[in-house]
Amino acid sequence: MKYGFGVDLGGTTVKLAFFDEAGTLLDKWEIPTDTADSGSRILPDIADALQSFIAKKNLSRESLLGIGIGVPGPVSADGTVNRCVNLGWGVFNIEKTLGSLTGLPVKAGNDANVAALGESWLGGGKGCKNVVMATLGTGVGGGVICDGQIVCGAHGAAGEIGHMVINREETEPCGCGKRGCVEQYCSATGVVRVTKRVLAADPAPSCLRQNPEFTCKDVFDAAKAEDPLALKALDQVYAYMGEFLANLCCVINPEVVVLGGGVSKAGATLLTGIKGYFEKDVFHAARNTRFALATLGNDAGAYGAFKLILDATA
C-alpha cells in the first residue's frame, strides 16, 4: 500500500492530511500559517511538520507517493505560484522548493481548484469527470474539472468564477476593483448586500429590520418564516446565481454543479431556488445539468491536494 499527503494552505492555518492510495483519510492535523517575513517560514514549517509525522509513524520513503498542496493564489501547470498576496509570496516554483525541503515529489494547485478536484473525486461530484464547483462563502471561489483534470489556464487563473461580471449597472466596486461581479451578489456578504438594498427600497415590514447586523443565515431563516422581503431578496439572489451558473455551463457543459461554502448550508432550498432561473437562462443542451451540495466540508482541499499527487504519480 502506498500513502501520501494532502496539504491545504490557508492564510491563518495549514491543514495537513495523510491518505492511503485508495483515498482513505487516515490522519489529519493543523499548524499555524506564519506569514511574517513575506511568508518565508511557511514551506519550512510544512516540511518540518511532515518530516516529524513521517518519523513518528516510522514510514519508509518508498511507501510515500509524495505531497499535494493547494495554495491561495494562481498556480500554473508547472507549479509556479504567481503571487499569493495574503501570504506575502511573490513568484516562485512551489513544487521545486517544497520538494527540495522534503525530498518528496510535490504537485501544487490553486486552493479552490484543488477543493473542486476533491469534491469531484470523492464528494458531491463523485463519479463525474466534468464538474464545476462554486464555493459560496465570504467571497465566491470555484474550480473547473474537465475529463477529471483541473483547468488551470495559461496563467493559473482559470476558475475565478466569482469575478465574472453579471451586472453592468452596479455602482459599488467589488474587492477585485471591478463592478458587478458574481461575488457581489452570490456570496454570503452578497446575500446581505442584496437584502439591505431590498429593505431600503421597500417599506414593507420585515423581521430583519430589528437587527441591522443581520447575516446571510438570518436572511434564509427569515425566508423560511415567510418574511416577504427576505423572500424577495433571495429571489433576486437566485436569479443572479441562475444566470451566472447558466453562463458557466454554456461554456463548460459539466455533468454536475457542486455548491459549497457557507451559503450552501441552506441546502435544498438553495438548489430549488437556483434551478428555475438556471433552466430559463441555460443553453438547451445543458439544461439537464445536475446540482449537488458539497459533502467533504473543510477537508475538500486536502482530498483534492492528495488527488493531485496521486494522479501525478499514477
Image (cartoon, rainbow, N blue to C red):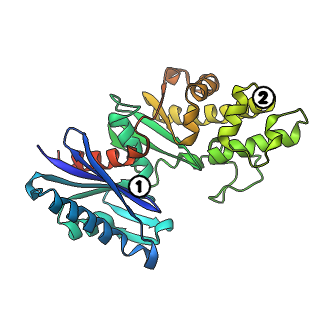
Give the CA separation, mark 2 to mark 1.
46 Å
Q: Position of residue 237 (x, y in %)?
A: 68, 35
Residue receiving disc 2: 227
Task: Judge by depth and name the residue closer to the eye, 185 or 299.
Answer: 299
Left or right: residue 32 versus residue 6 is right
Quarter of the N terminus within the rendering: top left
Quarter of the C terminus within the rendering: top left
Dot 2 falls on a residue whose secondary structure is loop
Task: Judge by depth and name the residue closer to the eye, 112 or 195.
Answer: 195
Q: Earlier in the sequence, mark 2 or mark 1?
A: 1
Relative to 173, say whether 298 is above or below: above
**Can residue 9 be seen in this snapshot?**
yes
Residue contact between numbered discs 2 and 1, judged by CB atoms under 8 Å: no
The local crowd at label 2, few if under 14, some if 14 to 19, many if 20 or more residues have their Cα within 10 Å, is some
Relative to 249, say whether 311 is above or below: below
Task: Judge by depth and name the residue closer to the eye, 242 or 60.
Answer: 60
Dot 1 falls on a residue whose secondary structure is loop
Left or right: residue 61 versus residue 143 is left
Residue 89, quarter of the rendered image: bottom left
Q: Position of residue 174 (x, y in %)?
A: 67, 55
Left or right: residue 302 versus residue 211 is left
Image label count: 2
Amino acid type, callout 1: Ala
Q: At x 55% / y 36%, what residue is drawn?
A: 264
Q: At x 42% / y 73%, what residue is drawn?
A: 39
Residue receiving disc 1: 154
The local crowd at label 1, few if under 14, some if 14 to 19, many if 20 or more residues have their Cα within 10 Å, is few
Relative to 32, say whether 257 is above or below: above
**Can residue 147 be seen in this snapshot?**
no
Q: At x 46% / y 54%, what residue is drawn?
A: 157
Amino acid type, callout 2: Asp
Q: On residue 62, which mark appears?
A: none
